[in-house]
Amino acid sequence: MTEALIAALFVFVLASFVGFEVINKVPPTLHTPLMSGANAISGIAVIGALVVSGSRDVNISVILGLIAVVLATINVVGGFLVTDRMLQMFKKKEIKA
């Protein structure tokens, strides 16, 4: 394995542990804003997929990039829909007379 791959794996493992600890420290009342922020950050995946699909080197990379754009967009939209549903749970329901 190359040194770059080992360094990348080290950063991935370290980021996984740090992320796990940070998420566990968040109180349940803040899960909705945390999810919304995470969904916004995952929009970066859409940009990455657009960059990959924009390359014209190999046809397979364009096809995989298109699939990545579709899946990342579904992920972002679905995440915001789930966040919206969670926010609706906190709204007071009107009492009908």
Image: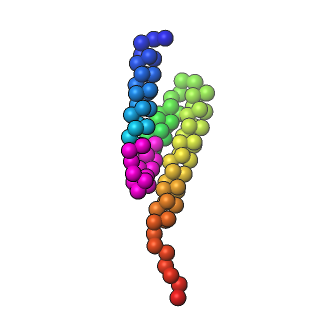
Classify residue 17 as left or right of residue 59: left
Q: Nearer the viewer, residue 88 or 55?
A: 88
Q: Is residue 91 above or below residue 62?
A: below
The way the protein has been coloured in the rendering is rainbow
Res 36 seen here = no
Res 96 seen here = yes
Q: Nearer the viewer, residue 61 or 44?
A: 44
- At horizontal 54% and vertical 46% (from top left) the residue drawn is 75
Question: Horizontal and vertical percent for residue 26?
Answer: 39, 48
The secondary structure that most of the magenta stretch takes on is: helix
- At horizontal 46% and vertical 35% (from top left) the residue drawn is 48
Question: Horizontal and vertical percent for residue 8?
Answer: 43, 22
Q: How many marks?
A: 0
Q: Residue furthest bottom?
A: 97
14 is within the stretch colored magenta: no
Toward which corner of the image does residue 15 lie, by quadrant? top left
Q: Nearer the viewer, residue 69 or 92?
A: 92
- At horizontal 56% and vertical 47% (from top left) the residue drawn is 74
Question: Horizontal and vertical percent for residue 86?
Answer: 49, 59
28 is within the stretch colored magenta: yes
- At horizontal 55% and vertical 34% (from top left) the residue drawn is 65
Classify residue 27 as left or right of residue 88: left
Question: Horizontal and vertical percent for residue 72?
Answer: 53, 42
Q: Is residue 67 above or below residue 28?
A: above
Q: Is residue 46 above or below residue 15?
A: below
Q: Which residues are magenta?
A: 24-42
